Amino acid sequence: MTVIPNISFDEGEALLDWIALTDALATGHDLPKAEIGDTFLYRGKDTLLSRAAWIDGLGIAVKSATIFPGNPDREVPMVNGGVSLFDDETGTLAAIVDFHLVTKWKTAGDSLLAARRLARPDSENILIVGAGTQGRALHAAYSAAFPQARITVWNRTAKNAEAMAAELKINVATDLEQAVRAADIVTSATMSTDPLIMGDWLQPGQHIDLIGAYRPDMREVDDTALLRSRVFVDSFDTTIGHIGEINIPLEAGTITRDHLIADYYDLGGFTRQRDDEITLFKNGGGAHLDLMTARHVLDAWREAR
């Protein structure tokens, strides 16, 4: 009887590194475009997100996530779920991979892939906006690609930023505008529904990385930020029509579809043309990225055995 691997968070974490993961994500986009299907269900602020992807030659992944913003008050993680990986040739279950492992590495790796191509290599100051679980993952990811950088965290609730800073031995910002203006890279992972990063604060040469807005009613930056930037997304299919950061200004006519320069199926388009331009990347996620990450985890697990 075939034993299905059940790869835990700790087991997978010990096998992975950020640069190899981003290389795997890039390679995954050289394969035929993923067939994807997303389902969103809402109850007030609570969300059930079910995502499936099939990439010919790589396999199938199904990931279901529950996002309950009130959970931290109950001392329960905000995001929970499960990931199943299926064999491409037979459709049989190939592995069960820890949900939080896939989410951590997929989400931060998604952003890091763009930053490795769009941010200035000499970036010295990185601002993390949001001191949650994903903020900590972003610290690990950006530290791997920009080891020389000084990292600062800002959070709406100051004590959470202070706790993260003490844990990771980084600095705390108390004034968001001042911190944004001083940063070379701004990476934001918040639950904000209204813009909290203003375009007038942005400086020449910055790279802006937006992760938090995942619903149609959510935004982390204002229209001015989009208009001042060259804008990239990870996937046109999972951002346009789904995520407020992109869809609200599109529907209002503030930007047009042509304002979105490229997604990861055109990685050659992810280039910085001038040192003084502002680049902005919207991380929309997607089951195809969960599939690429889960498969990378499985491959690393097999190689280690």
Image: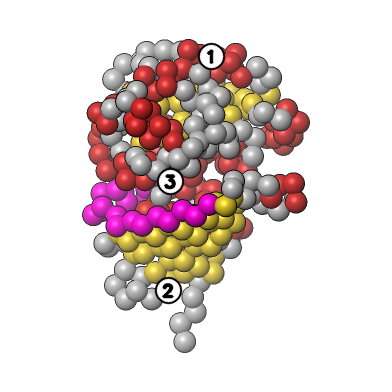
Residue pictured at 47% horizontal, 48% vertical: 106
Category of crowding for the residue at label 1, using alpha-carbon neighbours closer than 10 angstroms: few (below 14), some (14–19), many (at least 20): some
Q: Which residues are magenta?
A: 23-42
In front here: 194 or 30? 194
Secondary structure of the residue carrying tag 3 is: loop
Disc 3, disc 2: CB below 8 Å?
no
Q: Amino acid at mark 1?
A: Arg
The image quadrant that residue 113 belongs to is top left
Q: Amino acid at mark 3?
A: Gly
x and y percentages locating residue 85 in the rendered image: 43, 66
- Is 111 placed above or below 128 here? below
Q: How is the image coloured?
A: secondary structure
Disc 1, disc 3: CB below 8 Å?
no
Disc 1, disc 2: CB below 8 Å?
no
Marks 3 and 2, how far apart in space? 23 Å
Secondary structure of the residue carrying tag 1 is: helix
Q: Is residue 145 visible?
A: no
Q: Is residue 268 visible?
A: yes
Category of crowding for the residue at label 3, using alpha-carbon neighbours closer than 10 angstroms: few (below 14), some (14–19), many (at least 20): many
> Where is mark 1, residue-wise?
181
Q: Amino acid at mark 2?
A: Leu
Residue pictured at 50% horizontal, 18% vertical: 198
x and y percentages locating residue 216 in the rendered image: 45, 40
Among the two numbered marks 1 and 3 on one chain, the one whose residue lies closer to the N terminus: 1
Say if the magenta span includes residue 285.
Answer: no
Left or right position of 135 against 283:
right
**Residue 93's mark?**
2
Q: Nearer the viewer, mark 3 or mark 2?
A: 3
- Is 117 placed above or below 46 here? above
Category of crowding for the residue at label 2, using alpha-carbon neighbours closer than 10 angstroms: few (below 14), some (14–19), many (at least 20): some
**Residue 285's mark?**
3
